[in-house]
Amino acid sequence: MTKRIFRSICLVALLVFFSSITLIMGVLYDYFSKVQQNQLKLQTTLAAQGVAHEGMDYFDRLDSGSCRITWISPDGMILYDSLSDTAAMKNHLEREEIRMALETGYGESDRYSATLMERSFYSARRLDDGSILRLSVTHSTIFILLLGMSQPVFLVFAIAVILSIILATRLSSRIVRPLNELDLDHPMTNDSYEELAPLLRRIGSQQNELKIQKEKLQQKQEELNAVIFNMKEGILLLNPAGEILSVNPAARELLDIRPCPQAAAFHSHSPALQEILERALQGKPSEKTLELRDRHYQVTASPVCSPQSVFGAALLLFDVTEKEHAEQMRREFTANVSHELKTPLHAISGYAELLKNNLVSSEDICPFAERIYTEAQRMTKLIEDIISLSHLDERDLNGSLNMDFEAADLYEIAKAAADSLASEAEAADTSISLTGESAVVYGIPQLLFGIVRNLCDNAVKYNHKGGSVSINVSSCPDAVTLIVRDTGIGIPAEHQEHIFERFYRVDKSHSKELGGTGLGLSIVKHAVSIHHASLHLKSFPGKGTEISVLFPKNRQRNTV
Ligand code: ADP
């Protein structure tokens, strides 16, 4: 910009210079021409008087200098000429100044010679005898004049150029300085050219908009980063060369990615993972369940692409260990249920077939009917337990049960459970006693009853003849405790950690004989966890078993 202003100023200065020179020269040339014409007119008048007096003698003593004097007869013939031979000169009647002088007594004209680059002024006066005296002077044209003055003109030109350069340099830098000093970070604080105010206002408002947009973008980026970095699912983004663009801590740990100063393509230790990543980078999405660090992950590799090219790949790792485990449990449970139901059903259908075919003697009918009844009872119990368990499982899936929590007296519940088992206890020759105090638990009464009843049922079933079962309910500031103790067969140490699993029995045939389903303690475990309580087992083979349930008081619960 400075250069442009500099050039413009120089150009203008030179233009002004040349125009001024031309104008001044023109005006001066015109002025001096007029002065010269007036003088020529005066000289012509004086010379005419001299010639009128003295005739041809006048020219003898005359020194005409730069003037040319011509005397012309009334018929146009040249009588005298101070420069040329009169005989060789043409008739002058046609000359403009001569014609005017013949008509009016005085005539003048000027003629321009392109070849000689000269201009001649003619002044003619008619004498009394009708002859004409003409004086003429010649002077150079304005161009020749300028050529003649070339030295001083060049000097002035040089001075003008130098002055123009100095002034242009100063002026251009003075004009540009306020522009260079503009504070564009704070456009509204500038006190510069008035003409720049709208531009500065615009810059200011655009800067504000940009600032707001930048803040919004930053906030969104931070939110996104917070989400990605705190996700327990792993995220990995790769560029087309397979180099890592972004990775969250979960993926970093799972895939054992260490910070690397140089850009290098990511290579997984797992061939299966590497394969699906390479497929994704070729534009093909894939999904696989892989085992990483002893857990199961559903790995989804998707290409990030346009119809023309692949820009990279995104890898998502979801921990599906629990899901897989639940799936496995469900499969096992279904297989176990079918198996458990098949046995009593086979027995019932076998006995029924014998009865139908009259293959049973009349005295055996009663024991057969008794067996059918027992197997049917076992099936009913099994189905009841399965229903209870699936009901509790539903809570795990939906997060809610159709039962409300309420304040319930555990002592009263234990009493009801003990009463409900009175006939079984009597049949097994086992005594049941209840001690303790009234203790309020915030829970689901049906489930609490199920806990006590299942524990007591086992304590009666796996007891010795003449053995005892004692139930105790106590309360302390932190918790309410239920203890069911028996003097039964006890549980061997190696089985103790398994007895709460579904369909697990220490002695399968003994349990079946006693009408056990292998589900009682699973139901207890589930119900205990719904109440955020804890289970504790102490058992000594041959001596007895003690199972206690601890209900913490500080847990406030609503409907589950
Ligand atoms: P079951 O219907 O077979 O009793 P449970 O889930 O209630 O099923 O119990 C699982 C297994 O734990 C039982 O088969 C039994 O072997 C053992 N068991 C449970 N309670 C006791 C106990 N009080 N004394 C001895 N063994 C027990």
Image (cartoon, rainbow, N blue to C red):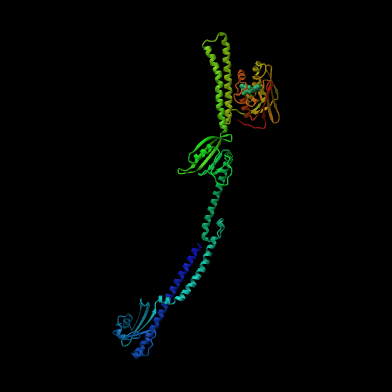
Q: Nearer the viewer, residue 463 or 549?
A: 463
Q: Nearer the viewer, residue 27 or 459?
A: 459
Q: Residue at 53% x, 16% y: name it.
A: 349
Q: Is residue 367 above or below residue 533?
A: above
Percent position of residue 177, x then y: 54, 62
Percent position of residue 101, x then y: 33, 83
Q: Residue furthest left?
A: 75
Q: Quadrant of residue 118?
A: bottom left
Q: Quadrant of residue 494?
A: top right
Q: Residue at 55% x, 51% y: name it.
A: 211
Q: Nearer the viewer, residue 265 or 310?
A: 265
Percent position of residue 36, x then y: 40, 81
Q: Is residue 79 above or below residue 432?
A: below
Horizontal arrangement in the rendering, residue 159 relative to residue 491 (left or right): left
- Asked if one can make out residue 453 in the rendered structure from this viewpoint, the answer is no
Q: Residue at 55% x, 27% y: name it.
A: 331
**Image label count:** 0
Q: Nearer the viewer, residue 272 or 521?
A: 272
Q: Quadrant of the C terminus?
A: top right
Q: Is residue 198 above or below residue 151?
A: above
Q: Quadrant of ligand 1?
A: top right
Percent position of residue 339, x then y: 55, 22
- Asked if one can make out residue 280 in the rendered structure from this viewpoint, the answer is yes
